[in-house]
Amino acid sequence: MKGGNELLISREKYLAAGVHVSGRYRTKFMKEFIFRIRNDGLSILDIRKIDERLRIAAKFLAQFSPNEILVVGRRDTCKNPLEKFSEVTGIKTITGRYLPGTLTNPSHEEVYMEPKVILICDPWIDRVALQDALKVNIPIIALCDANTTPSNIDLIIPCNNKSRKSLALIFWLLAREFLKLKGAIKKDEDFKYEVKDFM
């Protein structure tokens, strides 16, 4: 990799945001995404695989209109990145508590929705949304840390899914790539937002 030119952004920007730093606990299911284990036990995720999965996710999401996509993130660190992502792309997001039945119970008129795909920020924290998505049989994309057991996930995006800095970069990249693939912008330079706008 020469200077990280084949990546969506430079390797240095990925490293600065800490998207590759995971916890001490890891599951065998995430082994293929782990680049190495540091001396202090922290798992270091493979930046090339993170980048590759972000590209795949953006291409997949671009097949849908914004109102057919739902992104869910209960953790506090998801709030700002998701709100900005929604503002920039028009994609519906739910931050904070996800109400059970949002996807399955039409009698909850104030919250009921029928997306065609869902992206969840953490399969464990957002497990109620994950279970709802399984019941209605829609594709599930998930941000997964090294400690994730990714059962029932259709597309794993390996990353640090807890840090606000990491989440800001992830959703900044997804927003930029989504808009490019949709034809709303032609090149990276046309995307007038900075990562800090998503923090």
Image (tube, helix red, strand yellow):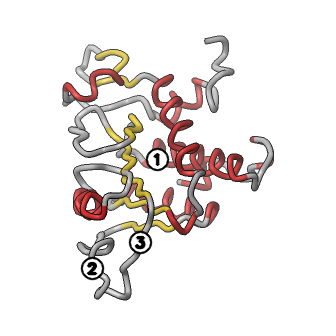
User: Which x, y percent locates residue 176?
Assistant: 66, 48
Give me the residue at 28% from left, 88% from top.
107
In depth, the one of 90 and 164 nearer the eye is 90
Q: Position of residue 97 (x, y in %)?
A: 29, 70
Q: Is residue 25 left or right of residue 74?
A: left
Mark 3 highlights which residue?
A: 114
Q: Which mark is residue 105?
A: 2
- Whether tag 3 and tag 2 are in contact, CB under 8 A, the answer is no
Q: Is residue 134 left or right of residue 164?
A: left
Q: Amino acid at mark 1?
A: Leu
* Residue type, numbered disc 3: Glu
The crowding category of the residue bearing disc 3, from other C-alpha atoms within 10 Å (few below 14, some 14 to 19, many at least 20), is some
Circle 3 — which element? loop
Residue 137 % position (x, y): 31, 58
Amino acid carrying label 2: it is Asn
The residue lying at 23 percent from left, 21 percent from top is 41
| Image mark count | 3
Q: Secondary structure at mark 1?
A: helix
Residue 69: x, y in percent? Answer: 49, 62
What is the quadrant of the N terminus in the image? top right
Task: Report which quarter residue 116 is drawn in.
Answer: bottom left
In the depicted view, which residue is nearer to us: 7 or 61? 61
Q: Is residue 146 left or right of residue 50?
A: left
Of the residues under marks 1 and 3, which one precedes in the sequence? 3
